[in-house]
Image: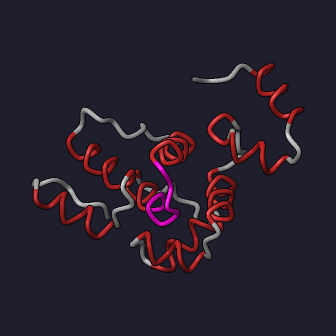
């Protein structure tokens, strides 16, 4: 359930640190850019950029460009999802990143999205997710 702005203000006032508030209410908070949101999650998860690159399955140079925000082209929805895998995000966090990217959230009524949701929710890798997508004759994450 979404909190009202007044409720968020009261919650913020009651916290001992802004980090605690941001961690507990990250789905309610506006981040300026996709790059800032990705960096927030990377730091929150304690991951190095190299770990994110490795887990994402995205070509190394391109992934670093996305993480630094220096690529001028908008990444595809699949690349954004792959970044979510790389960042070890949960489904709610992944939905927030997709929305910030300007893409539709994952949709449980869609077979492909259902497989991706299940994989994200259960910590399954991009590679194993692609194997399952292939089993169903669906487009791979790439």
**Image spot of residue 11 (x, y percent):** 80, 30
Which residue is pictured at 23% across the width and 60% down the height?
140
The answer to which image quadrant residue 113 occupies is top left
Which residue is pictured at 69% across the width and 38% down the height?
25
Which residue is pictured at 48% across the width and 48% down the height?
94
The one nearer the camera, 77 or 54, is 54
The one nearer the camera, 22 or 14, is 14
Q: Is residue 34 above or below residue 24?
A: below
Q: Is residue 124 above or below residue 10?
A: below
**Image spot of residue 6 (x, y percent):** 80, 19
Whether residue 74 sits left or right of residue 81 in the image: it is right
The one nearer the camera, 10 or 125, is 10
Locate the C terminus and report the quarter of the image it occupies: bottom left
Q: Is residue 70 above or below residue 16?
A: below
Magenta span of residues:
83-90
Q: Is residue 84 magenta?
A: yes
Q: Is residue 105 magenta?
A: no
Which residue is pictured at 84% across the width and 46% down the height?
18
**Image spot of residue 67 (x, y percent):** 60, 66
Locate the N terminus and report the quarter of the image it occupies: top right
The answer to which image quadrant residue 15 occupies is top right
- How does the figure colour the protein chain or chains? secondary structure
Whether residue 126 sits left or right of residue 94 in the image: it is left
The answer to which image quadrant residue 96 occupies is top right
């Amino acid at each position: 359930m979404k909190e009202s702005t007044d409720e968020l203000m009261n919650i913020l006032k009651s916290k001992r640190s802004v980090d605690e508030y941001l961690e507990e209410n990250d789905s309610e908070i506006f981040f300026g850019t996709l790059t800032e949101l990705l960096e927030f999650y990377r730091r929150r998860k304690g991951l190095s950029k190299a770990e994110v690159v490795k887990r994402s399955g995205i070509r190394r140079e391109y992934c670093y460009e996305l993480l630094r925000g220096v690529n001028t082209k908008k990444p595809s929805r699949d690349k954004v999802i792959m970044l979510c895998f790389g960042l070890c995000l949960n489904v709610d966090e992944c939905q927030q990143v997709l929305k910030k990217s300007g893409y539709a959230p994952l949709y449980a009524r869609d077979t492909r999205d259902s497989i991706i949701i299940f994989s994200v929710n259960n910590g399954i890798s991009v590679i194993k997710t692609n194997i399952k997508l292939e089993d169903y004759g669906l487009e791979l994450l790439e």
